[in-house]
Structure formats: C-alpha cells, structure tokens
Image (tube, coloured by chain):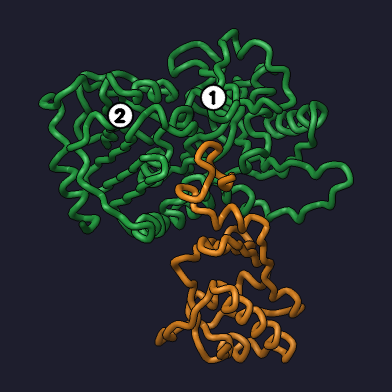
Chain colours: A green, B orange
Amino acid sequence: MAHRQWFDELAGRLMPFGQAQGDWIVHAVRAGPVRFDVIADARSGFADIVRAFYAATELDRPEPGVFQVWCLDGRHPRTLPGLHLSGAGVRACFEAARQGGAHQLLLPDPARGLITAFDASRGLGVFHAEDCARLPSWERYSPLKSFVHLLALQAGAWLAHGGSVADARGRGVLLAGPGGSGKSTTTLNLLRQGLNSAGDDYAVLAPGEGACQVHAVYRTLKLHPSAPLAIGPGLDGEPWEVDATTGKQVLLANRAGEVGRLVPGFRLSAIAGLRLAPEDGAAPVRAAPGFMHFALSSVQQAPYWADRSLAMAKRVYEVAPYADVAVARGAAGLSGASRRIVELLER
Amino acid sequence: MNFSSSYTLQSPPCIAEVVGNETIVINLDVGNYYNLQGTAVEVWQALMAGVTPEQLAGANGWSEAARDALGKLVQQALDEQILIAAPSPADVAVPAIAVADPAELTMSVYADMQEILGLDPIHETDVVAGWPQKPA
C-alpha cells in the first residue's frame, strides 16, 4: 500500500473521540510554541509516559485544531492499517523522512514493535507500540520526541539536544553536546548550586528577532551511575528511580505550576558547547567548529526534516554567543565546567 | 572535473548551511561533515548560484595557483559526493572574489562522527542503549 493510501486509511479508522471503545484520556502538552494533545487508553502503559512531560494537563476531549497524537498498543489491533514493508521499504521510509519535503512521515521500527506516523496536513499522528512494557527508555523518559521535533519545526522552533540552566532574572545558558558530554551532570550540579533549569537533555528553542526563548519539554532529570556527582537524595527531596534498561537514575522534577527548580522557560543568553576533555596522555582530538558541534547532535537525535532542522539551528546559533567548554573527568572537571557556565551566565 | 560546468549540492543526501563565515555541509548517507571558511565560503556561494569555476576564475583574473586550488576544491567536493554537475543558469552574476592565498580555497573533512551520523538511529542502534550505541 502506498504511503498516502495508508495515511488515508489511518485517518478513517481513528474514530471520533467519544465514540471510541475503551477508556480514552486526553492530555494537552505544551512547550512554548509546541502544542499537541496526547490521546491514550487509560488501561495502557501510555498513561505512564505522559508523566514525563513538564506541562501536560488532562482534558475532557481533544481541542479542535490542535495536533492529535494517538498512542495505540496491542489493544487496538484494527485501528492501524496493515503495514507490510520489507527491510528496504523500512529503510526507504527513514530516508524519505530525513529530507523536509514530505508532509507525511512513516517511521516503522519492527525490531521494537513501534510505528511513528506523522501527518502534518491532517494534524494527526500515531505512536503505536505493540507492547508498552517493551518501550525503549527514551520513550518513557523523553516520550514522543519525534513529534515534538516535527511540531517544533512547523512552529518555527527547534528541539535542541541540550541541558539548560537559568538564573532568577530569567536568563540562561544552553548546554549543547552529544550524549556523554556531560549535559545532565553539569545541569544537575548547577541546580544544586541554586540555579534553575528547563531540562537536562532537551528543550524547545524559539528564535525571534535578535533573541531566543528556551522552553521546557520534559521534567525528567537523568544521571548516569558513573557520573562524578554524589547521588544522595534527589533534588528538593524528590526520590530517584532507576531506569532498569540503562541503569540511569531518573528524577521526576516539578511540573509546570508546581514549586521547584524546573522553570517554563528563559531567555537564551549564551550557548555552551560541552565536550569531554581528552584523558591525561591521550592525543587531542581535532575539535569540530562551533556550529557543527552545536548543531550535529540535535540534528541527529531526531533526523527527520534534517535540512529544516539545520536551518533552524543556524537561526538559534546566530542570536546567542557560543563558547566551547571542555569538561575534564572527575569532580574537579565538573566543578571547572560549572564555573565556566556560571561565568557565561553572569556576562 | 569540468571548469565550464555549473555545480549544485547533491541533495539528498547532503544538507548545507552558511553560518557567519563558515559553510557546513553534512552528507547524511556517508556521515561525513565538511567545513569551509573565509574565501572558500564566498566561492561556495558563487558555485551554488550557478557560477562556473571558469567564470569565477576568469572574471576575477585569478592566478594559475588560485585556479589550481579552485579545481582541487571542486574535485574534492565531487569525490566526496557533495557536489554534482548541474545545468548552467542563463544569467548569473559573477561576484568579485579576491584570493589572497590559494591555500584559503580548502575544505576540511570531518569523519570523526561518521559512525554516528551514518547510523540509522531507528534501526541500527542498540535496542537497549539507543543512539549512538551500535548493537553489541
């Protein structure tokens, strides 16, 4: 079946809300200009992933005109049209989604039993998991990231792969860098020193005329067990939970409207490009130029509409000064990097 | 490499942006990324506008050394499959570009993220650890 037909059939099968069988719940998710409603069966494991959003409010019914993401699992076998793709077909879906031309993106992941479908023209998306118990870690702690990324681009914003810290004046620094560069650890270290944050791994960035606003998406703060930070009690007394698949410790911090260190957003005053310093005695690695380092991990984290994503990264990069911050290993390295970031914030 | 041909970005799979005095090109298939700076950025923008290498070097009266460096730059971009030959536009303005040092007409190639950028984050990553870990 051609993609367009598949999406036509999908739209026809998604029953109008209220006539649906089962116990459907709706949550309105907000992150700055990104708005969507998550519709999930209360009996499914999807109710659990909604808790990871910073701003998610339960509604009686979906809001007219707002993008709908239906979360479906094995309870709704007839809702999803049949999808019989060869390995090459699966790959072709991914290749097509990387470029920005298509309005309909179909991202099947047979190995994990997942399907992500995004129909920009109808304002409709589906996230299907055969078995919610098998959801990968990132879909539990940074859920529906692909939808946030695509909706951000549609709204003239960008989902950045970065931690963030902000001061009481509402100005802050984005901590950009690939996985393992120290974003979460440095963010948590600075939270413990009294700063605020809009998240440790992702944020929606909305560039405007000469300025950029940073918006919180998720309320999960994650720490690798090997991180050079005394774990101790969680932030503000919240307990940590352990992600069984990755071993990471995860903290669910405050939601929007609750008192806590996560704030809805702040004005971007600088970008810190984090990179791990080479180990003692190791040959220095040729560093990528600033923009490359800043943009690459975000583009690759959600590599759909990659050309639009790179263009939006450029808009963000052009409105905030960029500083390279090397993070040496160990507590002293973390402390040094944290000092640099505070200096950037106070500039 | 043909000096009289126009060239364009090979897209897909390449994407490119000019940021300040840098040009960034990413080949999403191969996973390499490329960086041009200074005069090479001006040359890149002229090529993307459809100016042929011959028009560029001829109109600006470049030295043999500069022409040679331009030829090597374009050939490198062809070898890396980020440029392809394209029909020449009917009317194209040739910008004034002075080459003080032919060594400026170079392109840096970064392959250190090849494994990550070339990795399909949906299907080729570790099922448990996710991107950028390859399956064990």
Question: Callout 2: residue from which chain?
Answer: A
Give me the residue at 65% from left, 78% from top: B73
> Mark 2 vs mark 1: same chain?
yes
Give me the residue at 55% from left, 17% from top: A241
Q: Where is residue A142 in the image (x, y as percent from the top left)?
A: 47, 31
Q: How crowded is mark 2: few (under 14 residues within 10 Å), some or many (20 or more)?
A: many
Q: Position of residue B48 (x, y in %)?
A: 50, 74
Q: What residue type is labelled 1?
A: Ala
Say if residue A115 shows up in the picture: yes
The residue that disc 2 covers is: A38
- Residue A274 placement: quadrant: top right
| Image quadrant occupied by the C terminus of chain B | top right
Depth order, front residue of A245/B25: A245
In the image, residue A103 above or below residue A325: below
The residue that disc 1 covers is: A244
Q: Position of residue A341 (x, y in %)?
A: 71, 32
Secondary structure state at the residue bearing disc 1: loop
Depth order, front residue of A128/A60: A128
In the image as oriented, which residue stretches furthest toward the left? A19
Count of marks overlaid on the render:
2
Disc nearest the viewer among 2 and 1: 1
| Image quadrant occupied by the N terminus of chain B | bottom right
In the image, residue A33 above or below residue B83: above
Position of B49 compared to A82: left or right? right
Position of A153 compared to B74: left or right? left
Say if residue A211 shows up in the picture: no
Depth order, front residue of B110/A76: A76
- Residue A229 placement: quadrant: top right
Give me the residue at 51% from left, 61% from top: B28
Asked if disc 2 and disc 1 are in contact, CB closer than 8 Å, the reply is no
